[in-house]
Each structure stands twice: as structure tokens, then as C-alpha cells.
Image: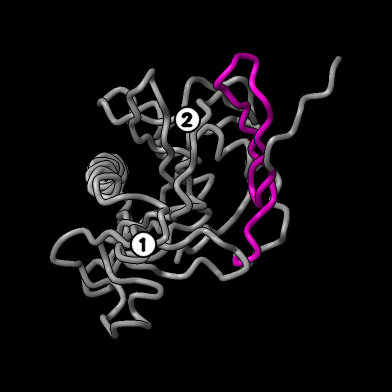
Amino acid sequence: MARRKKVYEGKAKILYEGPEPGTLVQYFKDDSSPTVAAPSTLEGKGVLNNRLSEFFMAGLNQIGVPTHFIRRLNMREQLVRMAEIIPLEVVVRNFSAGPMVTRLGIPEGTQLPRPIVEYYYKDDKLNSPLVAEEHIVAFGWANQQDLDDVVALALRVNDFLSGVMMGVGIRLADFRIEVGRIWEGDFMRLIVADEISPDSCRLWDMRLPERPDGSVPDPQPLADVYTELARRLGVLPSNVTHQMKPTLIN
């Protein structure tokens, strides 16, 4: 069997040339982000993230939010559309958590008046710094129309994910997506690319036992997040079990 040509390898995924022009095969690894307080390799994580990303991407496609996802090929791989990735991590925040607490002093868990969209420049050497729209336009990473479309896309993803998570007793505090450009003839449009999985979401469990006084505690990070999320959504392969923690996004 001929060896596939590797196009890109990141922390959690490998991209190979696809079987047709304009396609890629996305392979999900078990490797964990260095920022996770867990072993560098988590057995079965790639299998679950493949299933979870398929679930979310296919759902977005069905409601008219364009993504790069075409179909799942096997337990660890999916066929995706090739896209020109805008070098930004687009973060949508619904609640104060992580660096927002540190930067602005807003108590963790505070519901924000409205979803806030932030941009981080994708560069691991610089630790993906927070950037403003002025930086993005000035340095040519995207134009103002692109940014308007990115915000609209991100907020639609937020509506979908928040509703799905709420339906299984999970609060979506924040999440990160990547956006890519594709061309259909002379027409360019933006699509959701990369993946949507616990690696790129901050999830809080709303199904917690009552305190002795009858009150319900504040939501806490979802325990065993990969397995538990897949179980609640009904996409858990029967032969994968483990205990993991999610990547905390910027």
C-alpha cells in the first residue's frame, strides 16, 4: 500500500492528502496538549474526539453553518475539505473564566451580558497572543468583511453548541474554533475548520447532587470530560473508556 503524504502535523491531529483534489484526511491522535495537567498521551482520546467533532460538525452542516467536514472514514479519521486557514483562534466566551478572570478581575463563573468574541494570533512560539481587529486588518490576516463574517459564524456556532450542551446538562463557558477560506469558482466563503471537541471547549457540569441544605452547587468542570460528553451525546464507542481532563483554552 502506498504511503500517504503528510501535509501537516499538530499537537493532536495529522493531515494527509485526501483521495480527491481539494480534500484532506484528518487523523486524530491520542496526544494531549502540553497545557493539560495529564499524561502527554491519553489512550482513546483521538477516537472520542473524532466522533465528537463529527457530531458537532455534521450538526452545524445540517443547520446551514458551513464546515470543512465531509464524512467520517473510520475510528480515527475523517474526510474534510481543504481550506486556507485564517491564522486566528476565534474564542467565544459566555461566562468569565480563565484569562478573563486574570485580565479583568471578573469573578469566575459570571455570566457575561452577551457572548464576547476574542481573537488570538495562531503562533505557538508567541503563545497565541490576544489581538485586536486593528492588528488583524493591518497585518493582512483578514479584512473587515472577513471579520464581520467570522463573528456571525462564531455566534451561530455558539447558539448551536450552547443549545446542544444545555440539553445534556452541560454549560458551555467558552470555546475556540478556527475559520478557513474556500473558493467555489470566483466566490470565496468562510467555513468552520479544524475540530470541535473537548480540547477546544470549557465545559461545566450542571448535573450535580444537591447540598445537604437542598441547594445545587455551582457548575464544576465536567469530570472525565471526553468519555462523559460522548456518553451524554450518545456517540461513545463501547470499547473506549478512560479518565481525562479538557484542554483549557486561552
Q: Position of residue 146 (x, y in %)?
A: 30, 45
Residue 182 higher or lower than 86, as above or below: above
Residue at the disc numbered 1: 138
Q: How is the image coloured?
A: one colour
In this view, 109 is above or below 29: below
Q: Secondary structure at mark 1?
A: helix
> From this viewpoint, is residue 163 visible?
no
Q: Residue furthest right?
A: 1
Q: Is residue 192 visible?
A: yes
Q: At x 29% / y 31%, what residue is drawn?
A: 65
Image quarter where the C terminus lies is bottom left
Magenta residue span:
9-35
Q: Is residue 226 left or right of residue 168?
A: right
SS label for mark 2: helix
Q: Nearer the viewer, residue 201 or 83?
A: 83
* Image coords of residue 168 (percent x, y): 31, 43
Residue holding disc 2: 54
